[in-house]
Amino acid sequence: MKLKELCSFLDTSIPLSYQEDYDNSGLQVGVPDMEVNSALLALDITEDVIDEAIADSCNLIVSHHPLIFRPIKKLSGGSTTERIVSKAIKNDIAIYSAHTNLDSLPGGVSYRMADKLGLTNVRVLAPLKNRLLKLVAFIPENYLEKVKDAVFEAGAGVTGNYDRCSFSTPGTGTFRPGENANPFVGKKGKIHFEREVRFETILYTGLKEKVIEALLHAHPYEEPAYDIYMLENESTKAGLGCIGELPKQMEAGEFIKHLADIFSARGLRYSRIFDGKISKVALCGGSGASLLKEAVASGADAFVTADIKYHAFFDAENRILLADIGHYEGEKFSVEILYNLIIKKFPTFALRFSEINTNPINYF
């Protein structure tokens, strides 16, 4: 299969528009037209992981954490990233990463943590904002279904668990073709009246170019009329972190032990144990301490994340049990999400899980 075919699937299944502004998800290394025969799934890209891909004859690595996170000005081998990129290029290994877009995906990293803990009634903790656009297009009645099919195929019209969502209103369009026009209907120099439909749908910001291209290709007019609006709606499903309920209440100390067992968290850090029971749990894979206010506001009894700074434990102020299970420990299951997505779409494509423990932190 061509690399671009897999990248196109991942770009839309784990929308690039979900990623944070500072992120660099997507294709990191590789030529879109290259053939890929098998992929190695890894949390991080290290030199050992590249060597593993070479040994396993995998010419693609799909990771959660991006290899190229900051701009590279040269490839002289002066940094770890430079050496890894050079080795990947020399061995014709492509690299694709899905980072904060996988974090924000419904069923993404935090949801996988919730699944490991057996939480129920799981929903998003901090919904995505300012990621939705509305497309309004004016289409001749006889071409409505053709244009709708094209923009829906490009990814527009998805709302939560529903797709092909739209609204249509009939009306009359008017225009006068100029002397240099090549009108689909009407005559040059004369006002024309055409029965048209005002078609409305939504799309994520990252799909804008793809959807507009599909619209223009399917629309019969030389100059299709359309509008794009930014929406302030919050996503009902996508966003950072999640919250859910334990199958049964736990004492705080019991819950901490449960976390350590489930995530193999040897260096688990937590705030002061309080007397209350733990029932509702908020989670955020990776560095999620910035969502502490959302976790408290949600009524969670505990907030589980990683990379918590010293003073954040004071901020908990006995309102919530704050637990840091470790960055690697919370996100190591992200490869399972990637596997399930890819294998469902491409059931015969060879996938392997990396056997390299890439956690850079050691515990005494």
Image (tube, rainbow, N blue to C red):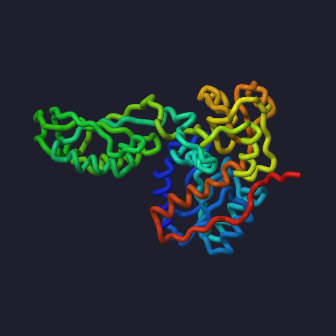
- Is residue 100 in sight in this rendering? no
Q: Is residue 172 left or right of residue 247?
A: left
Say whether residue 291 is visible.
yes
- The answer to which of 257 and 174 lies nearer the viewer is 257
Please state which of residues 135 and 358 is positioned toward the viewer in this rendering.
358
Residue for point 60% across, 45% down? 114
Q: Is residue 310 left or right of residue 226?
A: right
At horizontal 34% and vertical 52% (from top left) the residue drawn is 153
Among the 4 quarters of the image, the one containing residue 133: top left
User: In the visual, does 148 lie left or right of 339?
Assistant: left
Above or below residue 261? Residue 139 is above
Residue 91 picture location, percent across and down: 65, 71
The structure residue drawn at horizontal position 70% and vertical position 70%, both measured from the top left corner, is 52
Task: Name the residue located 37 percent from the left edge and 38 percent from the top edge.
Answer: 202
Q: Nearer the viewer, residue 27 or 9?
A: 9
Q: How many marks?
A: 0
Q: Nearer the viewer, residue 244 or 11?
A: 244
Q: Residue furthest right?
A: 364
Quarter of the figure with residue 179: top left
Residue 109 in the image, given as x and y percentages of width and height:
60, 48
Provide residue 338's location: percent of width, then percent of height: 56, 57
User: Where residue 26 appears, x then y in whole percent?
Assistant: 56, 53
